[in-house]
Amino acid sequence: MSGTGQRENPGNHPDDTPGMLHNVRVISYNIPDGERPGGIKVRFTIRVVTGKRAKEIDARQARAILEVLQWQRQHRKPG
């Protein structure tokens, strides 16, 4: 990972943190100042999961992507 990327070890989180799964890899990345769109602070946080939880997240993301594509199609400017 390049730039000002940061990697967080899931072991840094307390064991009693609600909703945190053990052995989940968390990757965080901050966009450098000069690359920010309009100066907006941008940070990506990625949690890598597997199994049933991954399938649930995949389905939720697919629904969200479909909704965005449908909205974009309905609001397309002629030209």
Image: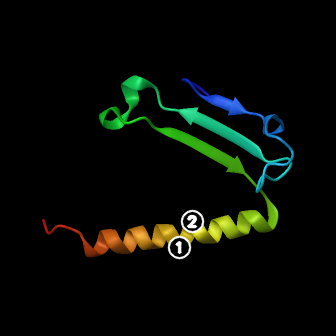
Q: Which residue is mark 1?
A: 63
At label 2, which amino acid type do we have?
Answer: Gln
- Tell me the residue at 64%/46% (across/down): 46
Residue 38 falls left or right of residue 21: left
Q: Determine the secondary structure under disc 1.
A: helix
How many numbered circles does the render carry? 2
> Foreground residue, 42 or 49?
42
Residue 51: quarter of image: bottom right
Residue 63 placement (x, y as % from top left): 53, 73
Residue 52 falls left or right of residue 73: right
Mark 1 is surrounded, within 10 Å at the Cα level, by few (under 14), some (14 to 19) or many (20 or more) other residues, namely few
Q: Is residue 19 above or below residue 34?
A: below
Image quadrant holding the N terminus, namely: top right
Q: Which residue is mark 2?
A: 61
At label 1, which amino acid type do we have?
Answer: Arg
Image quadrant holding the C terminus, namely: bottom left
Q: Determine the secondary structure under disc 2.
A: helix
- The tag on residue 35 is none
Residue contact between numbered discs 1 and 2, judged by CB atoms under 8 Å: yes
Residue 2: quarter of image: top right
Q: Is residue 64 above or below residue 32?
A: below
